[in-house]
Amino acid sequence: MNSERNADPYLEGYFLGHTKPVTQVRFSPDGSTIATSSADCTVVLWDLKQPIRRLCFSEHANCVNGISWSPNTNFIASCSQDGIVKVWEPKEHCICQQFLLSDKPLRSIDVHPIDPVTMVTASDDKSVKLWQMDQKKVIASFATHGGLVRSAKFSPNGQLVASCGDDKSLRIFDTKSGECVWCLTEETGMGRQLAWHPSGNIVAVALSCCHVKVFDLVAQELVQYYQVHSEPVNDVAVHPSGNFLLTGSDDETVKILDLLEGRPMYTFTGHIGGVTAVAFNNDGSRFASAGCDRQLIVWKTQSSLGDLLNREPSSADLDLTDSYEEDVGFKGTFGV
């Protein structure tokens, strides 16, 4: 990626509407709408075409910690501090189904990428639960964490679940057997959020110790280690091409990291207070950030940058299924 100014991402717009910090941000599958959850007990849908606030979902009675769009059907799942999941259609006077999954706060929710009735939640009760909406029951509980679990997400093919939390571990579960197939304990920081690489072999973790770590699940090793933030990192997202990583931190910045070259590329400012949530849309042409200042900021990539962001990784750039021994620049530690 070059540094010519005409190739830089630029601010497309910002939105204000929440009365308390934003906890998570997610693009709709078609990219036309953004959903934000908040400590003000609401989920707001923002129309990027207008741009206006399209809908405010206010059925939760407590802080909404996580949201997930179903990739194949038209509904949203949201989870809250009171252990309740609500599944609803993004429209006025929608039908809403409610599920009480825990007597402890739910920190995250993720809809299965293929089977829209299957979801996974992470909870303060130290468990990761796999459950089916149509059967209205938990079908598996992975209770091996030693502290509250902050994030649990399906792999791209839905066969694995990755989770992280306050016990400083990254755990990978097989959804069919229910077994923990890999566990790595972090020495310095707690996992605040994680993101899968599109290949399904790589997981990036945002840590409370201000670092971001990238792990290869096939080689079972750390392959990248970034020290680019000065405060805890709250969220992380992988670009759809798999070439770039987006991070948000309490240091009030958003950063783009180049996974092919193993280096920080861009730093974006604009938030007043910690950045709590970041996300790419499905084609990588936009990304969004939100935070303690209650703002949602949407960034756009110009055409020349968009072409480069969407390039296909070649074997000379990055081989995600083989050893990294020949991938020059992929391993390393980088400072601010």
Image (cartoon, rainbow, N blue to C red):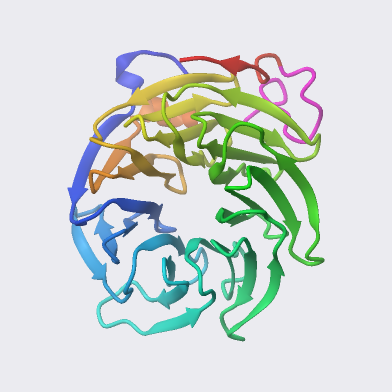
Q: Is residue 287 left or right of residue 261?
A: left
Q: Is residue 104 visible?
A: yes
Q: Quadrant of residue 57?
A: bottom left
Where is residue 287? Give x, y as percent.
37, 41
Q: Is residue 122 left or right of residue 160?
A: left
In this picture, is 331 found above or below 20? above
Where is residue 273? Give x, y as percent.
27, 37
* Front-most of residues 30 and 78: 78
Residue drawn at the location 42% of the way across and 71% of the way down: 82
Residue drawn at the location 46% of the way across and 44% of the way down: 283
In this picture, is 125 found above or below 281? below
Where is residue 164? Give x, y as percent.
61, 48
Where is residue 232? Give x, y as percent.
45, 34
* Front-most of residues 330 and 12: 330
* Front-most of residues 81 and 116: 81
Total labels drawn: 0
Residue drawn at the location 53% of the way across and 38% of the way down: 206
Magenta stretch: dominant secondary structure: loop
In this picture, is 292 found above or below 97? above
Q: Is 90 in the magenta?
A: no
| Quadrant (top left, top right, bottom left, bottom right) of the C terminus | top left
Q: Is residue 312 visible?
A: no
Q: Which residue range is magenta in the image? A: 310-327
Q: In this view, does 123 lie to the left or right of 251?
A: right
Q: In which quarter of the image is residue 144?
A: bottom right
In this picture, is 203 found above or below 50? above
